[in-house]
């Protein structure tokens, strides 16, 4: 499920424009699915690395432990940001900036048309 939230796009001169942050929200079911997928992937890697001589002494227990650890971390993620769009306060161009899923506001990034440094924050 996607959600749009109002944000402010600022530059270092203090000018601000309204913008939109697109966020993907995970339901409880989706969070379980994502967590189990991660667990499955890690344990699959543990099985595959059994066949790598010597390295398997480290890799197999490593992936076996990483499975539940990464699954729990995945389960705790209830939302991920996708992009921010709005007008750049410096150059005035309309833009959409793709964001790292783990990104949290406020954050500094660059406008896509002119690479101006901009700050995204919750309004
Ligand atoms: Zn700009």
Image: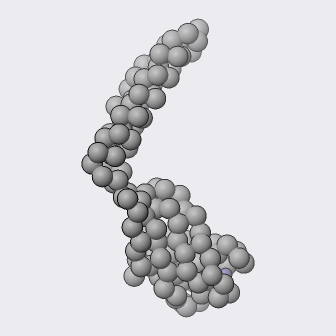
The location of residue 27, given as percent across then percent down, is 30, 52
Q: Is residue 24 left or right of residue 119?
A: left
Find residue 13 and report its image quarter.
bottom right
Residue at the farthest right position = 114
Residue sitting at 38 percent across and 26 percent down? 65
| Quadrant of the frame with the C terminus | bottom left
Residue at the farthest front position = 1
Q: Is residue 25 left or right of residue 57?
A: left
- Which color mode does the image show? one colour
The location of residue 105, given as percent across then percent down, is 44, 69
Figure quadrant, ligand 1 = bottom right
Residue sitting at 63 percent across and 72 percent down? 110
Q: Is residue 12 above or below residue 55?
A: below
Q: Is residue 118 above or below residue 62?
A: below
Residue sitting at 37 percent across and 59 percent down? 1
Residue sitting at 55 percent across and 91 percent down? 15
Find residue 25 and report its image quarter.
bottom left
The location of residue 12, given as percent across then percent down, is 58, 84
Residue at the farthest left position = 28
Whether residue 50 appears in this view of the structure is yes
The location of residue 100, given as percent across then percent down, is 53, 58
């Amino acid at each position: 499920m996607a959600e749009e939230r109002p944000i402010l796009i600022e530059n270092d001169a203090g000018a601000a424009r309204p913008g939109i942050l697109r966020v993907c929200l995970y339901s409880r079911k989706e969070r379980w699915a994502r967590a189990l997928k991660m667990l499955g992937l890690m344990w699959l890697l543990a099985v595959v690395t059994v066949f790598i001589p010597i390295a398997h002494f480290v890799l197999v227990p490593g992936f076996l432990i990483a499975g539940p650890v990464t699954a729990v971390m995945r389960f705790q993620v209830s939302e991920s940001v996708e992009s921010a769009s709005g007008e750049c306060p410096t150059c005035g161009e309309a833009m959409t900036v793709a964001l790292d899923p783990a990104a949290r506001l406020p954050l500094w990034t660059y406008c896509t048309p002119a690479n101006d440094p901009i700050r995204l924050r919750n309004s």
